[in-house]
Image (cartoon, grey):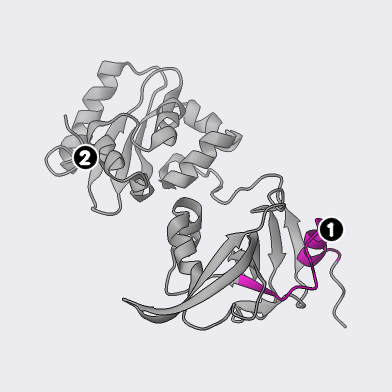
Amino acid sequence: MKAKPITTIQQLLENQGFDNKAKVKLVRHTDKRFPDLYNWYCSDKDKFFDYFKRQTKAVFSESDFVIAFLGEASTLARFIGIYKVNGVTKKTDKEGEAFFYDLEEVSGFENLKERIIIDWGKGTTSWHQWYENEKEVVEIKFRPDLNYKQFKNYDDIFLTYSELQEIVRHEYKDWKIPLSATNAIYLILDKETGKQYVGSTYGGDGIWGRWTNYAKNGNGGNKLLTELTKTDKNYANNFQWSILTTLPKTITKDEAIVIETKYKNKLGSRAFGLNSN
């Protein structure tokens, strides 16, 4: 006999006033056709919710509310909000006929959003289920950490814009300490075009000091990166930060720029990339 869960998502939501008498669907968002779905939610919510609202079948038409989750490892899922179904329109777009739902987020559950991890259970192929299917809460995060990844070593650094922003915003010690301890020649890759930007850090704040500027706006004040992010406010979501080589904490500006120039020449980032000088 299966043991009864200690705490379920239903209990947590009802304790905060959710109406369990409504018609409610639970939805776990994961889709092999769109492997970047998780990243869409983290860095381009408009794109994610366009996906969420467009359904090829009338899966939400008999529902008053939809409780949404992001699929995580194995059978886990992260709570991302409750949405009221205000209506639906059936129409044809460039991808074919579909149901377009008018979904409105329900307030009052912000303290749980992105922090509650549940076990969806063995039926992960059933991505939408009725509310009566109890889902065990396996973890309550201290803070939302959608973009958190553990620091391993400098060679393994590959950060998206949303990951960089979260690391800087929360000042995770496992990142701040090593990034503050050294300088580096770093690379920013535009995954949309394949173009590259090579930069260097020098001074007492190390890599952390320079990358904190990138976390603010995505461009760090670099000329060509600024042009891209001014044209499209979400363009920094195409960028990926990595380390080419570390440099001593005591390196001077002139010494760092000499090494930076060598990497620009090796990678052709001035002739074919995003370095303007």
Determine the residue positioned at 25% across, 17% down: 254
One can see residue 157 in this view: no
Mark 1: which secondary structure?
A: helix
Task: Please identify the quarter of the rendering in which residue 250 is found.
Answer: top left
The mark tally for this picture is 2
Mark 2 neighbour density, 10 Å: few (under 14) some (14–19) many (20 or more): many
The kind of residue tagged 1 is Asn
State whether residue 166 is above or below residue 77. Answer: above
**Image spot of residue 18 (x, y percent):** 78, 62
Foreground residue among 226 and 213: 226
Mark 1 neighbour density, 10 Å: few (under 14) some (14–19) many (20 or more): few
Q: Is residue 100 left or right of residue 13?
A: left
Determine the residue positioned at 20% across, 29% down: 261
State whether residue 152 is above or below residue 126. Answer: above
**Image spot of residue 164 (x, y percent):** 47, 41
- Quadrant housing the C terminus: top left
Q: Is residue 80 left or right of residue 116?
A: left
Q: Nearer the viewer, mark 1 or mark 2?
A: 1
Give the residue number, with chain letter if any, for mark 1.
Answer: 15
The segment highlighted magenta reads 6-27
Does the magenta run of residues contain 76? no
Give the residue number, with chain letter if any, for mark 2.
Answer: 274
Determine the residue positioned at 46% across, 68% down: 51
Task: Please identify the quarter of the rendering in which residue 117 is found.
Answer: bottom right
Instruction: Measure the C-alpha gap from mark 1 to mark 2.
Output: 52 Å
